[in-house]
Amino acid sequence: MIVTRKWLEEFIDLSDISTQEIITTLNRIGQEVEGYKKIEIPENVVIGEVIECERHPNADKLNVCKVKVAQEELQIVCGASNVAAGQFVPVALIGSVLPGDFKIKKAKLRGVESFGMICAAREIGLPDFHDGILVMDNSLGELKVGEYAGKYFNDEIIELGITANRGDCFSIYGIARELAAGLNKEVKLPEFSYEELPEGIGRIVKIEKNEIKHSSHLLKAFEGNVRVPLKINYRLALIESESKNNLDKFVKYSMHATGVLLVPMNVCDMEFVDENGVDILQCFGKYAVGIKNDINVEENGKYVIDANYIDPKYVSEIVFLNSLKTDEYFFRASRGSEVNLKFGIDYLLNEIKLPTYSGEIDLINEIKQKIINIDIKEINEIVGYDIEEKKIVEILKKLEFDILSISDGSIKVGVPLFRNDIQNIQDIAEEILRIYGIDNINSKAMEFKEADRTNEIIRKIDKINTLKLKSVANGFYEVIHFIFEDKERLKKYGFKTVQDNIDLINPIIKEFDTLRTTLLLQLLDDIKFNKSNGYKRIYLFTIGSVYDKDRNEKEKFAFVLNGFNDYENTANSGKPKKVGFKDAVDKLSQIIGEFELKNSSYNLAHPYQCADIIQYGKKIGTLAKLHPKIAKEFDIDDTYFCEIDLDKISFEEKKAKGINKFQKVTRDLSLVVDKELKYKDMFELINSLKIDELIDFYPIDIYDLGEKNSLTIRFILQGQKTLQENEINDIMEKILKALEAKGIKLR
């Protein structure tokens, strides 16, 4: 997007603002400046009036001109074919230095003296936008003979890198709005005036069909010979815009100035139709919305201008879905053109200065304004700085937001219709920040706060991974199975099966004709398979889904142990021992932590070696030895298994404890106990004493005394200071008295 300082000054007063400040402001408010160029006419180039123009007596292609410059007339020989009497032209006086270090001197051309040079645009440092010498008019200001030409042509060009979402900034008017907010100034709109004919637009424009749904249109008509003034040709050259004809130049100029989409066409019968989801204005079968007509510009022709707007998201989607041809009009429409259609069409008519048919055809569909409620506290959290409510309101007003209400730290705002990019509070926070100025926000140290972002799914995955890691660390191998089972086999071993009316309809094979209700049968198959392959030590585990009779799914963890409790190696004398119930208990405790066992029964289990696993007071699963009869059916020997509901396994959060630096003390008590007394009861009794210094105790020896047993318990004591002998004795005496109260005596 290219803007010039003088063009901007049509919309905003910059008389007290330097160009450098304009560039700094644009960069500060997020409109990145990508280039800058200054147009400056050389000194001693002035405005001259051609008084006479005659053929050179000695050259067919040269003219001898009398040119009035201030109070004097100069004789200048000119080779341009378009020079003529009555023209106002730029004249380089003797002594001036033109671009390329070309110095103007007194000269004699074919015997005729020349005292200066009538210049073309490129010869005084302007873009080459015409043929021959540069003929001037009053469009750049009232011409005064002898005036420095730079007064009319000097300008400064700023090139901006506008992001695609800011369609409102693809115009001089849009950039002026941005500058007004950044410089705390007001936008001024030009005063429009043009001649209106007594005939109304209905005389020459007839809408045959109107099915307009998705866009807005405003039509006006004019007639006459389209002539392009110097100002428009010059500025179009500065912004590097190419045009097809004179009317197209006015359209391109007005669109660049206002941002309003303008489509010119010859007078004809018209109709609005809906084609591919886009409102199309047709004229003799040629599309005029989205794809511009190649209209004919004729002497005293009659023309219609259609100012239009279409929702940018909608038109982008339709063009993409239907692979429609795109052009400059689509580029502007898809980014969001100016919604004030009358502003754009009046601007063009004001510049073209031709008689206009009175009235207009208004086919404008109302655009619903977006309303957003913003919380001041949330805005400041997004920005990272506390901006006063008053300042926020002031900035929003500068940006032309409608302040609908203010209450209790909340502001209800209406988004300007030209801001399609504003969708939520984050967008508004960005607007406030860029106008407030990021340089005005005090820097502060970055602060990192760790937050618990875990959820139920993550915790479940962590639990499964922990189980797997601990199982592998204890010598188990993971196995994975299908979730299908043999229904008859499940029934044979006493397991419930899925009800027939909700069971599998098309099983993949006969042996997989239902959903499994246990993990154990598949694990027993794995033991049989591994034993047949010569393995002597088989530790397997699996985690997977099982189903109840109503087809409700839950996950279980299961393992099996078979064979030796250790690997064979040369260091051992003889074969390793076979696994036993204690091995299964030890492995389970290493995997899930503390638990208790309670006698129970299970359809696969040995009648005297089966227990419920109790953890934190609730049953979570079963630990048992496989029934010998079932082991024989699977052709395997002694096997121990465990199956637990995954959701019921509890892993307490591990918290680090400080290391006690004081010495531990060990004391043993040898006690005489009844043979019927369970160690569990003694454990609970000692534990109930709540002796802080007693950090651990456990049985280390037991033997038969006949009617009673001798049991030796080791006690580990450690305090928050070095324990004295009398303190140790007091603790042991307390324990002994509690035991004696229950009939347990010191041996």
Image (tube, grey):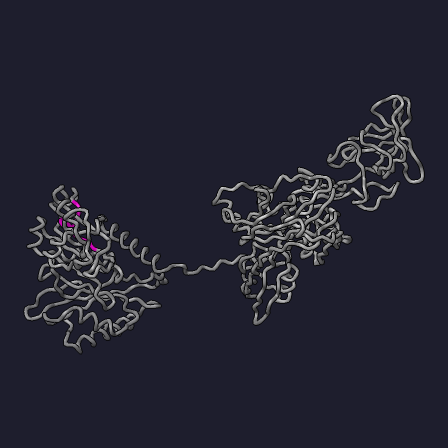
Picture coordinates of residue 244, whole percent (x, y): 66, 37
Please identify the dominant SS of the magenta region.
strand
Seen at 59% across and 69% down, the residue is 405
Along the viewing direction, whichever of 66 and 636 lies nearer the viewer: 66
Q: Could you tell whether 732 is left or right of 297 in the image?
A: left
Along the viewing direction, whichever of 433 and 154 lies nearer the viewer: 154
**Magenta segment range?**
558-567
Q: Is residue 242 visible?
A: no
Image height of 725 relative to 362, above or below? below
Picture coordinates of residue 107, whole percent (x, y): 89, 26
Image height of 599 relative to 481, above or below? below
Is residue 155 shown in magenta?
A: no
The quadrant of the rendering that contains the C terminus is: bottom left
Q: Is residue 203 visible?
A: yes
Is residue 561 shown in magenta?
A: yes
Seen at 75% across and 32% down, the residue is 131
Picture coordinates of residue 86, whole percent (x, y): 86, 37
The quadrant of the rendering that contains the N terminus is: top right
